[in-house]
Image: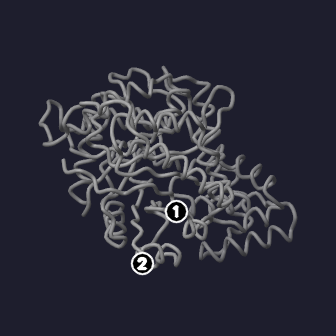
Amino acid sequence: MEPMAHLGVGIGWRPEIADAVERLHGLDWVEVVAENICPGHLPEALGRLRERGTRIVPHGVSLGLGGADRPDPQKLAALGERAVALGAPLVTEHIAFVRTSSPVLEAGHLLPVPRTRDALDVLCENVRIAQDALPVPLALENIAALFSWPGEEMTEGQFLTELVERTGVRLLVDVANLHTNRVNRGEDPTAVLDAIPLEALAYVHVAGGIERGGVWHDTHAHPVPPVVLALLAELRSRVEPAGVLLERDDDFPPETELAAELAAIRQVVTADRTAPAASGAEPGAVQELPGQGAGEATRTRVALGQAALLSALVAGTPVPEGFDRARIRVQARALAAKRADVVAKVAPELPGILGGREPYRTAFLGYAKGRPMTAGYRRDALDFAEHLLIRDLPADPAARRRLTAWWRERAGARPPRRIVRWARALTGRAA
């Protein structure tokens, strides 16, 4: 495996901090959420960064390479198109599943895959499909999780190591996620760093979070805590990362605070190493290991487990045997809250029509209990509006007229007639 090109210290580019990012002194590179940009129509601020030579790496969130289905060719093509448009040296994604096809359900979030032989076989085959389709190298990120799967057969270190050995994929190590999993799943982050082949390291993520009730929430909306910087130092003592990136997705601080966090990260990265690099397994040539292929029976077993879990999280079905029920409830609430927040960003008019943030959230969370997302956030916003109209809501006639006009403009159809609304309400349908 060839050494990674030097990236330096960077930040996740978001429209809300675009002006600040342009002014940050000594910024080496940025990462963008791949699904949030359109090749040929880059935001002007992002285009200016590229013109002055700042490297831009697209970071995907929707492939779901850990899912039971093979990767969507259209999603792979779109990710590759963004890599070419940005002149990116690589693209990145996550070791996670985000949807199921039977039943059709969308998590709207990155969910952990079970560390089993079946799941690893599926993941490896999906990764090889992605590698063949993408025009640049692929790196995969370890994710944060609120819960563990029952019956796991490998540690995180063993799972990641075998993934690299079997596919040659690079790793994007998120040290904040290592801390999250220490709190939530009792996993030792230094044991993970000792076990994985750091020769495969592409770059590193650093982010903030918060602990509530014994659960660490990887919010990307809080300052980077000292414990996460300490984990970055642990990694730095083993290997010199090609790049380190600060992630911030919400509750953006003043520009001076962003600059101070980047300076703290740079200080850790440039400090003298205090221990020799870990030897690790050399991830050069891809190895042919037993069980490398994922047959249809294997995919079916993985699909059944993921469908049962996701259905419990978003559709209110019983929690599968062996899971921590309290943690699943926490995750389900978090998914519904995130869904409400993202829909409000996708359709910012809705909170205003419904009388403000709190009435909107109350109405949306009530809707979400009975209507899992099946086709993305924009469709979800339309379905939510139709759900309200079917029930002659909101109660204020003026607000209902505004919601009807909003829905009609975006759905391209006439709202259901009163008799149709009654029939749908009786049958529990909202679409």
Left or right? Give the position of 31 relative to 215.
left
How crowded is the residue under tag 2: few (<14 C-alpha within 10 Å), some, or many (20+)? few
The quadrant holding residue 382 is: bottom right
Residue holding disc 1: 13
Q: Is residue 17 placed above or below 277 in the rendered structure?
A: below
How crowded is the residue under tag 1: few (<14 C-alpha within 10 Å), some, or many (20+)? many
Left or right? Give the position of 169 relative to 257.
left
* Residue type at tag 2: Glu
**Residue 286 place in picture, x, y as percent:** 15, 42
The quadrant holding residue 298 is: top left
Image quarter hosting the C terminus = bottom right
| Residue at x 47%, y 52% (from the top left corner) | 245
Q: Earlier in the sequence, mark 1 or mark 2?
A: 1
The circle drawn on residue 51 is: 2
Task: Pick whichever, 117 or 407, lies toward us.
Answer: 117
> SS of the residue at dot 2?
helix
How far separated are the C-alphas under marks 1 and 2? 15 Å
**Residue 403 place in picture, x, y as percent:** 75, 69
**Residue 30 place in picture, x, y as percent:** 46, 61
**Residue 170 place in picture, x, y as percent:** 28, 46
* Residue type at tag 1: Trp
| Residue at x 38%, y 24% (from the top left corner) | 191
| Residue at x 57%, y 69% (from the top left corner) | 23
